[in-house]
Amino acid sequence: MSGTVRRSVVTGTGSALPKRLVTNADLAREIDTTDEWIVERTGIRQRYIAGEGETTATLATDASRKAIEAAGLTADQIDVIVLATATPDQTFPSTASKVQEALGCKNAYAFDVAAVCSGFLYALGTADALLHRGMGKRALVIGAETFSRILDWEDRTTCVLFGDGAGAIVLESREFPEADAATVPGIIATRLHTDGEHNELLYVDGGPSTTQTVGKLRMRGREVFRHAVVNLAGVLEEVLAETGHAPAEIDWVVPHQANARILDATAKKLGLSPDRMVKTVELHANTSAASVPLAFDLAVRDRRIQPGHLVMLEAMGGGFTWGASLLRM
Ligand code: UT7
């Protein structure tokens, strides 16, 4: 429509963590590792691990309830639910449909998106596109994982790195005068990438159609690290170029929380100030698709992220998949 611009605006955020907190020292009692090694190599100090009765769907439901409440909505006002996970409750139905039922979002269609640690960016891009196409006015976008259930607890090179959790946001499609496009809230641009060539660097060694088992996570960390810094810097530059924004204009970067060293290296490569990066890796470890919305919710609730702020979300994970999204609050 001429004279107006349509944007998917973030109207609420929420997050949820399992009850059980596991510190590095707790792990060092069971596994051949040390708090010192984990902190120095990753920045991680603790993680939350799902217990009995806690699943990807229950965590997603708790996070979503808070996001819907923060948006000032009731469950029946949600039109679409897009849930990113690599650890669904069951192979099918989708975890999104379990969340839809648990929340009572009876007017929403719901489905899962699988892009591992980049899943939330993929879910966000998908939901934004659906809203632009008029396939609903309000979307619930969730990243939720219980990676503890696909970890090989005998493999110290991977099991210390991950945690469980969920984060959610509500998007609402709104129209603004085109003349105000530079300052109005909402998602400005999203870029997504996949390169299937490197899937042997980060994968799960099982699945319904291959082994008929769930499988365990396998990762060649050093190689993934190298690709992560290059790919993330690349996609961030792409989004900045597309939107015409300079790194200095970004109020907050909310990155995927895999490793504090990746965050620092990416910030340095782009000339972003490290104190503009929301860092939660020490608190939550790597929660895969949940890590971006978990960190986002934390920074919204502690009021670091304010209305009007320019916020960049970014993630990279198995596939490889990676992406970034620039939005104004
Ligand atoms: O979320 C998806 C994206 N994922 C990522 O972005 C993860 C990217 N990768 C990383 O974050 C890092 O590569 C790791 C944290 C996984 C590993 O750090 P690193 O500095 O690359 O260590 P490394 O794999 O090169 O291992 C160094 C040493 C090895 O010993 P040697 O061979 O040098 O004697 C490992 O055996 O550290 C040893 N090691 C450990 N020691 C104590 C590996 N894991 C542990 C451990 N505790 N848990």
Image (cartoon, rainbow, N blue to C red):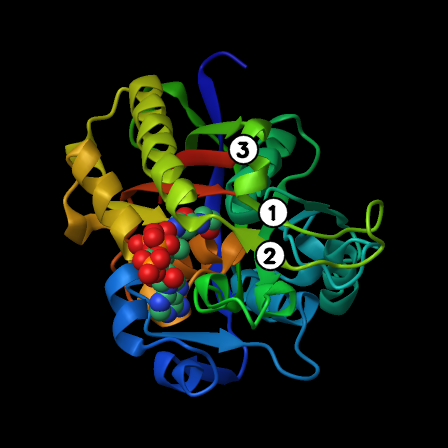
Residue shown at the point (46%, 68%) measured from the top left: 156
Of the pair 114 and 168, the residue shown nearer to us: 114
> Is 295 on the left or on the right of 97, as rendered?
left
Which one is earlier in the sequence, the residue at label 3 or at label 2? 3
For label 2, the residue is: 217
Examine the image and state in which quarter residue 267 appears.
Answer: top left
To which residue does mark 1 refer?
A: 203
Q: Position of residue 49 (x, y in %)?
A: 54, 77
* Circle 1: element type: strand
Q: Residue furthest top?
A: 2
Q: Return the x and y of residue 197 as percentages of the image width and height.
A: 57, 27
Identify the residue shown where x is 53% and y is 46%: 120
The vertical placement of 3 against 87, above or below, is: above
Determine which residue is flagged by label 3: 198
Q: Amino acid at mark 2?
A: Leu
Q: Does the closest atom of ligand 1 sit within 8 Å of the Cβ of label 3?
A: no
Instruction: Work out whether residue 284 or residue 24 is closer to the camera in this orientation and state it.
Output: 24
Q: Label 1 to label 3, Cα distance in Å?
A: 10 Å
- Report the label total: 3
